Image: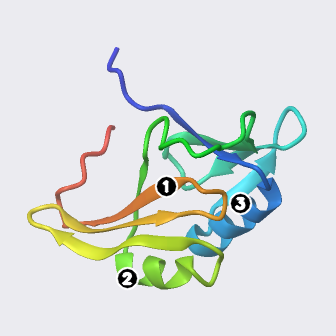
Amino acid sequence: MPNDLAHFAIHADDCERAKEFYETVFAWKFEPWGPPDFWRVHTSPGAIAGALQRRQHPIEGRGMIGFECSIAVDDAKAIADAIEPAGGKILTPPITLEGVGTMIRFEDPEGNVVGAMQYLEGVRNVSS
């Protein structure tokens, strides 16, 4: 069995604010699931499963702990333009990575650092 990434979780202090941000910027859909303050995240058919959930431990001046995920997008500039109006913060404006594509890094309204990548045609490694 391959050891593919199969799930991601977005931790948030204000789940409604985080949900609104990802709905606005990426058009993701959320489905209440299980305990209070927990939603399944639907990005697109065939994509890895995700969750939005209340942060269990507060952020207190520590660096990033965990994985930094990147979201494959069709237009990195359009996504970058949508982030700040939706309450996020651009950390790295669109930059070209030779032979890969155009990426941005941003912080969502909950302090999570995320990447978005507009891959060059044929570059994105996708599991089948």
Q: Dividing the picture into quarters, in which one does residue 33 lie?
A: top right
- Earlier in the chain: of badge 2 and badge 3, it is 3
Q: Are marks 3 and 1 in contact (CB under 8 Å)?
A: no
Determine the CA span between mark 2 and mark 3. Answer: 21 Å
Q: Dividing the picture into quarters, in which one does residue 92 lie?
A: bottom left
* Amino acid type at mark 3: Ala
- Earlier in the chain: of badge 2 and badge 1, it is 2
Question: x, y (%) of residue 38?
Answer: 80, 41
| Image point (24%, 46%), residue name | 125
* Amino acid type at mark 1: Val
Question: Dot 2 corresponds to which residue?
Answer: 77
As helix, strand or loop, the secondary structure at mark 2 comes to: helix
Question: x, y (%) of residue 14?
Answer: 79, 56
The disc placed on residue 113 is: 1
The one nearer the camera, 11 or 43, is 11
- On the rendered structure, is 119 left or right of 83? left
Visual colour scheme? rainbow
Question: Dot 3 corresponds to which residue?
Answer: 18
